[in-house]
Amino acid sequence: MQKILILSDTHSYLDPRLAPHLDWCDQIWHGGDWGDVAVADTLLSLKPVQGVYGNIDNATVRLMFPKINHFSCEDVMVGMTHIAGAPSKYKPDALACFATQAPDLFVCGHSHILQVKRDLNRKGMLFINPGAAGQHGFHTVQTAVRLKIEGKRIFDVELIEIPRYKATQ
């Protein structure tokens, strides 16, 4: 069994209030817009990380992570890209991801809108946009998702909501 923490759109800010969730998980998945290589380096120092780069990420982050990522976790095929749209309104990068290999679970970011949904038009694929874990953007609550995977089973999906406040740095 693997415990997964899914983040996106950190925009150079790794909220210390995520620490209990980082301790809890076995793996971290990031849907892009890291914002700063320091966020990636910090997460990589803690746990195994899967991710993609986002539209704001610099060349260093783009060398660390691909635009489209396919990997397996237990017996679940995972697909990931940053700008994906949503079920029934997928963008070209998501369609390219699906054309390469149909995922059981698909992770994206970009919209800053938390969404977890089964896409019945794609054999029940689980679509997850964890929203935005950082503070940059229009969102009023910072969000992330955590879940467990065992074999082909995806379960105990939990939404994480952290009230947004101005960082004092």
Image (spheres, rainbow, N blue to C red):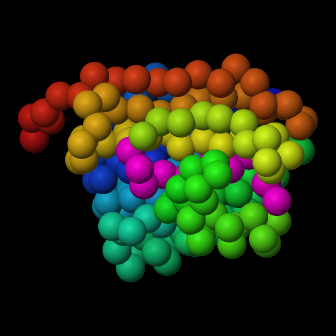
Q: Position of residue 37 (x, y in %)?
A: 36, 63
Q: Nearer the viewer, residue 12 or 104?
A: 104
Q: Position of residue 23 (x, y in %)?
A: 52, 28
Q: Is residue 80 visible?
A: yes
Which residue is pictured at 90% across the width and 35% down the height?
151
Q: Nearer the viewer, residue 83 or 5?
A: 83
Relative to 136, does residue 81 appear above or below in the rendering? below
For the magenta stretch, what is the residue range?
102-112
In the picture as drawn, the residue positioned furthest to the front comes out as 88
Locate residue 25: give its quadrant.
top right
Which residue is pictured at 24% across the width and 47% down the height?
137
In the picture as drawn, the residue positioned furthest to the left comes out as 168
* In the image: residue 54, left or right of residue 103: left
Q: Is residue 23 visible?
A: no
What kind of secondary structure does the magenta stretch mostly adopt? loop
* In the image: residue 35, left or right of residue 95: left
Asked whether 103 falls inside the magenta stretch, the response is: yes
Asked whether 108 falls inside the magenta stretch, the response is: yes
Q: Position of residue 43 (x, y in %)?
A: 47, 48
Locate residue 61: give its quadrant.
bottom left
